[in-house]
Amino acid sequence: MNTETIQEPYVLRSDSGDNRPGIATLTLNRPNQFNALSTGMIAALQTELDAIAADPAVRVVVIAGAGKAFCAGHDLKEMRANPAKAFMQALFKQCGKMMMTITQMPQPVIARVHGIATAAGCQLVSTCDLAVAADVARFATSGINVGLFCSTPGVALSRNLGRKQALEMLLTGDFIDAPTALQQGLVNRVVPGDALDAEVDRFAQSILAKSSLAIGMGKQMFYKQLEMGLDAAYQYASEVMACNMMSEDAAEGIDAFVGKRKAEWKGR
């Protein structure tokens, strides 16, 4: 058995210090396996995300990768070593649950993409609320190259890219570069590698300056309304906004704006 697997945790968590609190960084920690989403890696991510979702002290989550790659997708060696359909069903269910946790947790999640993100790794980038990529990063849903259509990554990809752009990636398995990913809506920003941390922090600090109550309500509303028809979406969003307006933070924010002072949020 690989001694690295025994000694090192799958995911490293690092919380920002007292002078800049509120940010938790989760680093995928299998660099020799290009941070593949094995069952162990997915379980470790699930544990960390569940803990963070219940922790109001954490306001922003950053997902990063150790080594050369961000995440190279599922662990193909593990999958071939466990060829039973029941294993595959459990694996994809486990991964889907972890991806849904990212969407459903109240804190915004930022992908810090410094290298390749392929297959389920590209799904992970697509699932995160925001994504910042280094200019050398590349993206692909490469399962088709080994006879496996990236069906589950396609769910996330199709909710970020246009239909034809998503299908081009899914049908060809070809890489797209970071500028193309930006143009097509897969990532929010592309910066030189040495500016990656600063750009991620800029996003995080902007979010930290806002009401956590409004951020949490808004994130939940955004994803729910995406699955609704237009009329139902407006009805739902109107109700959420009315409830938001009843909050202490909305009253404080508006009063601070009118009074030209900095808001003191209560919902943090």
Image (cartoon, rainbow, N blue to C red):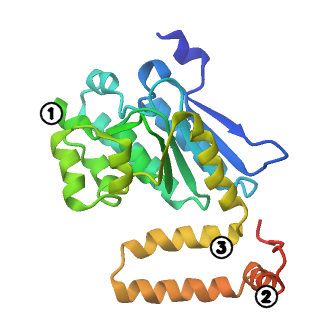
Which residue matches tag 3?
A: 214
The residue located at (52%, 61%) in the rendering is 104
Q: Nearer the viewer, residue 67 or 107?
A: 67
Foreground label between 1 and 3:
3
What amino acid is labelled 1 in the image?
Gly
Residue drawn at (57%, 58%) of the image: 105
Q: Is residue 145 visible?
A: yes
Image check: 256 left or right of 161?
A: right
Report the side of 268 relative to 91 (left or right): right
> Of marks 2 and 1, which one's residue comes earlier in the chain?
1
Residue 153 locus on image (x, y percent): 31, 47
Amino acid type, mark 3: Ala
Report the side of 131 relative to 260 (left or right). left
Residues at circles 2 and 3 in contact by the CB criterion of under 8 Å: no
Tag 2 residue: 258
Q: Residues within 10 Å of mark 3 (few under 14, many from 20)?
A: some
Looking at the picture, which amino acid does disc 2 mark? Val
* Residue 215 image offset from top left, x and y in percent: 63, 68
Residue 151 on image: x %, y %: 24, 48
